[in-house]
Image (tube, rainbow, N blue to C red):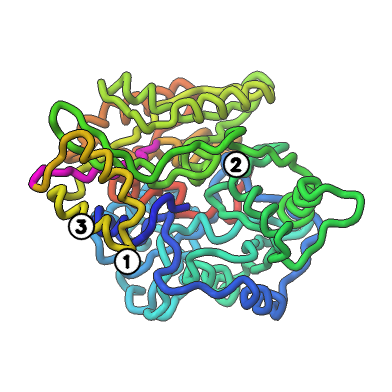
Amino acid sequence: MGLHGDAAFRFLVPDAPPYRRTDGDRVPSLAPSRIGVLNQLRTTPGIARPSLVSSWSGSIDRLLLAFPSYGVHTPELTAGYRSVIGALRPGTGFVVVHHESDRQTVEGWFTEAGHTAQYVPMPDYVDFTDWAEDGYLALTDQGEAGTYLLEPWSFPRSGDSLIADAVEEFGSVRATQAPLVFQGGNCLIGDDFWLLGTDYFLDTLELVQSGELPISVPAGRTAVEFVRELFRRHVDSDRELVLVGTNRPLGLKAYYATVEAGEYHLDIPGGGVGDVQPIFHIDMFVTPVGRVDGRFRVLVGSPALADTALGTRSPYGLQNAYDEIAADFEARGFDVVRNPLVHRPHISQQLTFAALRAFADTPDGAELREVVAEFAAAGAVADTTVKVRPWHHITWNNCLVENSAEVGRNVYLPTFGHGENADLAVIDDEMERLWGDMGFSVHRLADFNPFASRQGVVHCIKKYLERGA
């Protein structure tokens, strides 16, 4: 969910990492009508009683990972991948999507860690990403063995939309599809409920009302009722659907002109922000833990707690949105625990006010004209230096939770207190204490800053396929 034009963003943030979790295809997507025709040609298995694979409950028995060539050959990403592989229990099953030319390297990671895996080769020309969580939901048909990957009606990263079919071709997992809009990272699965970020419920509602989905609202039903029924029919027949979001749009602008102590900053705070969600995927700020004294516990991130721990200030942190969502959970009877969540900027480049104004005068830069006018009103002249400051989220909520009667309580936690972000070590420690106090064994993973800068963390790079007791 971008809040700014791509051309302007790339001009302002030339060092933006590729393959961000919010990126869509870099080539034109198919028109909705053509997507509809293609989808209707597909043969998809029917599921009588769909039930989602849990986000927290039971042993992690089998999961899907995707390792594209760009990640295999980027050491800081490889370190993250391998820390996950090395931390998971012996006997864990892996389904691993990889580019054909990288098979030997990827297979070596699992062999060295003492694991075996089912490998799913993709042609080198297919441009998929390492965000294995997002392109589908994993579910079962109650009373039957086997896992299904349920794909949405369309997905903005077309290479990733090929993964479910490839996995089906090389193994026992089957692929199916629903006339709904969702992404895996915007869904979390509890015991008798599942959470869906409100943004994608609204997207589905909009497509139903516009006629872009091949379904019609039955007479006597509201569109909202019918969309809820569609999610119950296709996604989970028994769990209650709980929407997660604010009651009103967040209202965050794409660009802000900030003048402090004689310095001029062009702030870009909206990377990864949704329409009614403070982050575009709820797995970035909500963590299901399990029931405690009859109430289901969730962690909900808080930029204010991070600012207190670090002595920083997050003017675009949207604290009110997190607080509203936490209060809504509490009103529903959840046990809510707040945890630090960082909203952090970096300087992507420095340019003169004249250069910024010149770009704003082009068609690609039109949306920057408001901040240019504000800088001018604040006293900027041609040779004034403007520092471009994009913001991103660093989150410990995006972890792997294993709340199991058989193998115990384990959490696989990303760390961020490394290098130029060494100050975050205090929150690494605080999160370890928090989970330890809840009775979990904490398994610290590698430095996940290179993932967070791309708007995802460890929960985003896997898909749970099977969980035990």
Answer whether residue 447 is visible to the viewer in this image: no
Question: In the rendered image, is residue 103 in sight?
Answer: yes
Label 1 vs 3, first from the N-terminus: 1
Say whether marks 2 and 1 touch (CB < 8 Å): no
Q: Position of residue 268 (x, y in %)?
A: 32, 44
Task: Work out whether residue 469 or residue 77 is closer to the camera in this orientation and state it.
Answer: 77
Instruction: Give the residue pinned by disc 3.
Output: 358
Q: CA distance from mark 1 to mark 3?
A: 51 Å
Count residues near mark 3 (Cα–Cα under 10 Å), then give few for <14, some for 14-19, many for 20+: few
Q: Which residues are magenta?
A: 383-395
Q: Is residue 162 above or below residue 6?
A: below
Q: Could you tell me which secondary element the residue under label 3 belongs to?
A: helix
Count of number-bearing discs? 3
Q: Is residue 209 magenta?
A: no
Which residue bears the numbered disc 2?
58
Mark closest to the chain's N terminus, 2 or 1: 2
Question: What label sits on residue 108 in the rendered view?
Answer: 1
Badge 2 density bin: few <14, some 14–19, many ≥20, Cα 10 Å: many
Mark 1, Cα crowd under 10 Å, few <14 / some 14-19 / many 20+, is few
Going 44% across and 76% down the picture, which residue do you hit? 121
